[in-house]
């Protein structure tokens, strides 16, 4: 098991997920300042917007941080160049294969960490020269695969020689300790950081997470091949009804267009998409990123009998 603290130059092996709309410069800066690794979620944002968020991080801290690039974004090519120009220390990638940018990023000294949902993709990414992978189980919020964290992480650990970061269903020290037992070198958390003081998620969004029970998340989009986990509301009920009736991809898309922004920024938790993992039922408060990280590190240390 390799040391990702050395790989990324961070104090704790805790990475914040690059969540669309929610993971902007202030959140990433707060996580990095607290000793974790903050990530800006580029999502579908144009290059100049991502550049501004990078500046925001650097106003908060000099510590390392990263940018998550969604490779399906129409701006992926531009953002791939921005991270080089801005000398971003690391990138995580989702929704695709980052191979076409790898040579450019490696030449710039950027650490490349794709998010994977299968052993085959993890092996492909290792062969391509990536520095680590995030093995993300289907417990996580947002776009998901089919394997659970408990089954995916150890299989990926056994299949590759690069560090594996566990994601999906982790929100406390017990989850971190479990991830280490499965062979992970660190963890990535999204939902827990959505319910942080520094996150720009609307208070309604944070409240939905804090008030969640264990059964409050659901998966939409399975029929389209793009399953997404979010908290149950009017939108998910309408979507699942349309899906069961065999609605077309276009009809389903129309229902969710702009719905993530509506939830995160405008606080519409009824018809917006409130992306959150199954772990939401374990989150009972909104804390600062520093308190989240310190509390988790302390609990994990007590369980493992060593510093994480």
Image (cartoon, rainbow, N blue to C red):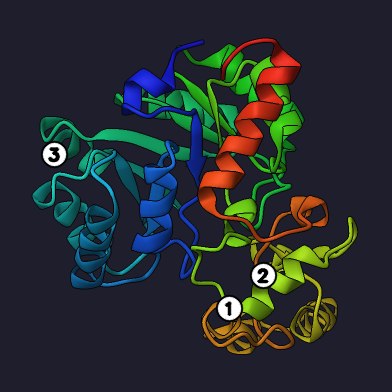
Residue at point 35%, 65% (across, down) = 73
Residue at point 14%, 44% (across, down) = 87
Residue at point 30%, 69% (across, down) = 74
Question: Which residue lies under the disc numbered 2?
Answer: 206
Q: Disc 2 or disc 3, which is closer to the eye?
A: 2
| Mark 2 Cα-neighbour bin, 10 Å: few <14, some 14–19, many ≥20 | many
User: Which is nearer the N-term, disc 3 or disc 1?
Assistant: 3
Question: Which residue lies under the disc numbered 1?
Answer: 202
SS category of the residue bearing label 3? helix
Q: Disc 3 or disc 1, which is closer to the eye?
A: 1
Q: Is residue 287 left or right of residue 80?
A: right
User: Which is nearer the N-term, disc 2 or disc 3?
Assistant: 3
Relative depth, front residue between 46 and 283: 283
- Distance, label 2 to label 3, CA atoms, is 38 Å
Which of the 4 image quadrants contains residue 175? top right
Q: Are marks 2 and 1 in contact (CB under 8 Å)?
A: yes
Mark drawn on residue 104: 3
């Amino acid at each position: 098991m390799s040391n990702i603290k050395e790989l990324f130059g961070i104090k704790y092996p805790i990475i914040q997920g690059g969540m669309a709309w929610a993971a902007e410069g202030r959140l990433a800066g707060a996580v990095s300042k607290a000793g974790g690794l903050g990530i800006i979620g580029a999502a579908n944002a144009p290059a100049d917007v991502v550049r501004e968020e990078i500046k925001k991080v650097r106003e908060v801290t000099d510590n390392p941080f990263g940018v998550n690039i969604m490779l399906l974004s129409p701006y992926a090519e531009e953002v791939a160049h921005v991270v080089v120009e801005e000398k971003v220390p690391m990138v995580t990638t989702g929704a695709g294969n980052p191979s076409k940018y790898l040579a450019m990023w490696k030449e710039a000294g950027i650490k490349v960490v794709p998010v994977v949902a299968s052993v085959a993709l993890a092996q492909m990414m290792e062969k391509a020269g990536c520095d680590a992978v995030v093995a993300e189980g289907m417990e996580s919020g947002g776009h998901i695969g089919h394997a659970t964290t408990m089954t995916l992480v150890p299989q990926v650990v056994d299949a590759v020689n690069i560090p594996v970061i566990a994601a999906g269903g982790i929100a406390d020290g017990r989850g971190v300790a479990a991830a280490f037992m499965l062979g992970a070198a660190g963890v990535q958390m999204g939902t827990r950081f959505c319910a942080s003081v520094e996150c720009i998620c609307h208070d309604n969004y944070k409240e939905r997470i804090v008030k969640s029970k264990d059964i409050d998340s659901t998966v939409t989009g399975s029929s389209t091949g793009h399953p997404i986990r979010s908290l149950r509301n009017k939108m998910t009920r309408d979507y699942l009804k349309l899906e069961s009736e065999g609605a077309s991809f276009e009809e389903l898309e129309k229902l969710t267009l702009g719905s993530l922004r509506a939830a995160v920024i405008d606080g519409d938790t009824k018809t917006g998409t409130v992306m959150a993992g199954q772990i939401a039922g374990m989150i009972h408060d909104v804390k600062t990123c520093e308190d989240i990280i310190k509390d988790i590190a302390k609990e994990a240390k007590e369980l493992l009998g060593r510093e994480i």
